[in-house]
Image (cartoon, helix red, strand yellow):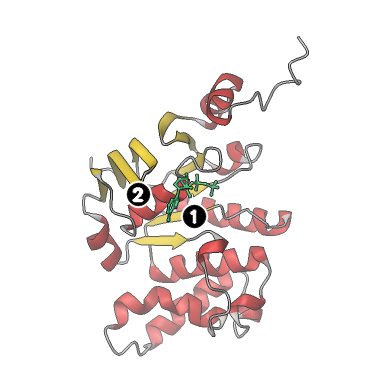
Amino acid sequence: MTAALDVTDVTVHYGEVLALDGATLRLDAGRICGLIGMNGSGKSTLFKTIMGLVKPDAGTVLINGAPPAAARSAGVIGYVPQSEDVDWSFPLSVRDVVMTGRYGRMGLTRRPRPADRAAVEEALARVELTELADRQIGQLSGGQKKRAFVARGIAQGASILLLDEPFAGVDKRSEATITRLLRELAAEGATILVSTHDLQALPSLADEAVLLMRRVLLHGSPEEVLTPDALALAFGLDVLSDGGSR
Ligand SMILES: Nc1ncnc2c1ncn2[C@@H]1O[C@H](COP(=O)(O)OP(=O)(O)OP(=O)(O)O)[C@@H](O)[C@H]1O
């Protein structure tokens, strides 16, 4: 069967910096995969490479068997970027941001049809942002901003969702809402790759987990990946230990 996401031996340099070094990852449809790794381990680079925003020096990315550019223009991939990668002063309302998920279907005129408007309203309702839909996007809380981008992916009808640290700077209620939404979307068949630093929440969020350190060190169930040995290897310290008092 064709994998929903197939990343094979991907290597990426930024000038002299080696950000990914032979990363390989295969995800089947309907799965939620948590991506963990220390700062600078290449998580954002992996997302950008899957999106086709960064070109690998070597290796391939296939989304439902197609290269990133084709998958993007078909509206297959939804992307929730890291907050730092977004210009929050942009004069767009929350509803406008969600509507950008429909652009691929609108053609050059970008004139929304009733079906586009209906999809946007439904997506806003699913992320519980209907009441804030007219607000400028920068005037939302951290968690609400993330939900707005998840709504964009929903309105787009994306079958692959990439979320770069959706829980960073987010309160527990928004985290629970986003987790519930991701579970619902996966149950409907979406494939979800989500980076997080919240290791404790990983088993309740994800079906599988990937430990990244420029390449995939481990890929298995969250329990298989969250072992003290694996985490010590990836993070360079014994994050689950009692402080080494033995
Ligand atoms: N545009 C860029 N130009 C040069 N180097 C970059 C660029 N983007 C990332 N890097 C470098 O590539 C490496 C991987 O960065 P990346 O942002 O992918 O890591 P990350 O795992 O997402 O980190 P974090 O958890 O801090 O978000 C780092 O060494 C980083 O400094």
Residue 137, position in %: x, y?
Answer: 59, 77
Q: Which residue is mark 1?
A: 163
> Counting other residues with Cα less than 10 Å from the Cα at mark 1, is it few (<14), some (14-19), or many (20 or more)?
many
Quadrant location, the C terminus: top right
Instruction: Kindly identify the residue that appears in the image at 59 percent across and 39 percent down.
Output: 202
Instruction: Kindly identify the residue that appears in the image at 35 percent across and 90 percent down.
Output: 111
Q: Which residue is mark 2?
A: 15
Toward the top, the furthest residue is: 246
Q: For numbered disc 1, what is the local secondary structure?
A: strand
Q: Marks 1 and 2: CB-CB under 8 Å?
A: no
Instruction: Kindly identify the residue that appears in the image at 28 percent across and 43 percent down.
Output: 3
Front residue of 228 and 5: 228
Q: Is residue 191 visible?
A: no
Between the C-alphas of marks 1 and 2, the distance is: 26 Å
Give the side of residue 63 with respect to residue 238, left or right: left
- The answer as to whether callout 1 falls within 8 Å of ligand 1 is no
